[in-house]
Structures are given as structure tokens and as C-alpha cells.
Image (cartoon, rainbow, N blue to C red):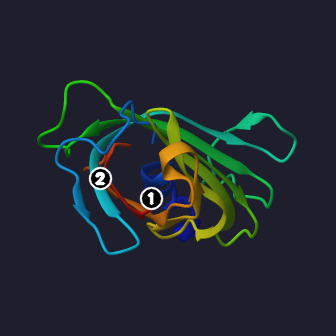
Amino acid sequence: MSHLTRRATPLVAMIVGSASLALAAAPAGAKTTTPAHAKTTTLHFFQKQTSQVVIGPGGKAIAPPSATNPPVVGEEFISTDDDYVGNHTHHAKTATASDHLVCTLTTVTGQATCDGEIAIGGSMLLAENVPLDLTKLPIVPLNGGTGIYKHAHGTASTVTVGTTNNSDFTVKFTT
């Protein structure tokens, strides 16, 4: 049970889970390679959490799981973030992205099904109906997109900064 209560920090870091960029192309500093048929892009952000909530199976906000308030199947963990090009030590002053992740607990041991969006300009990278283990710092698979990211596939991952709910956020995808 204690491993479930420790999942809050990795969960918050991922609730990414996932970002909305106000750019029509990859931001400065993005690394790209261009194979004959695909283009791989890696984006680096400092992710600042803007909201986090736990919704109980009854649809109302509840306290996060703890030793005295164990998680139950059906709880939703929802988070949003603003994303700044760079990392926690050196990043843009203005957010150029935001992300949103919703995970629904499918077992009391931390398994969940998640949906996330990373919006970039007028386009989005998507993680739709992906299984995750919330007791670990997961790598969220990206399995689609809209606009210039239509048919994109890749991953989104975070590394928590200290004891904050903020993270260094890496998004790698192929279009």
C-alpha cells in the first residue's frame, strides 16, 4: 500500500502526462533527424503544474490517496501543466506549450488507463487509452495526433524537479 501513496509525485510529474505549444513548428533547440520516410523530433521543456485533482468514482473531487485513504478502482487523477522550452535550470520566460493527462485507476495496485494531450500551436500529440503503472515514473506512449502531428508516434517522459510538482519534460515523436 505504501508504494501507492508514493505514486503521487511520479503521477503529478507525468500529468503530461502531457503539453500545448503555441508554435507551428518545433521550438528552437529541437533535434530532428530525417529518414527517407519519417522525421523524428525531440522537444525539451520545463513543466510547471497548473492543476491537479483526484476525482472519486462518484464524480466528486476527493483527497489524494494516502495510508488512511487508500485508492479505489475508478478514481481519476487529472493534471495540467504549462511547458517552457528548456529545462528547470534554463528555460524560456513564456510557456509555449501546455499538457493534460487523465488517468483512471483500474486496480488498487496502481494500474491505470490514461488519456493525454500535448498541444503544439494548433496541433496536438495524443496518448489515447494507454495503460500505465502509476507506481513508477512512466514513459507515456504517444499514439496519434492532429494537424501537423497527425499519425505521430513516440513517447513523453518527465523527471521530477526536487520536491516540487514541476518536472523536466521530454517529448520524442516521429511523424
Which of discs 1 and 2 lies nearer the camera? The answer is 2
- Residue 10 tag number: 1
Q: Quadrant of the N terminus?
A: bottom right
Q: Secondary structure at mark 1?
A: helix
> Which residue shows up at 34% across the image and 75% down it?
36
Q: Seen in the image, is 52 located left or right of residue 172?
A: right
Q: Label 2: which residue?
A: 43
Mark seen at residue 104? none
Question: Residue 164 appears at what percent x and percent y?
Answer: 32, 43
* Neighbour tally class for label 2: few under 14, some 14-19, many 20 plus, Cα within 10 Å: some
Q: Residue at x 50, y 33 (%)?
A: 122
Q: Is residue 159 visible?
A: yes
User: Where is 95 relative to 7, above or below?
Assistant: above
3 vs 152: above or below = below
Q: Position of residue 37 (x, y in %)?
A: 40, 72
Residue at image location 33% in from the left, 31% down from the top? 96
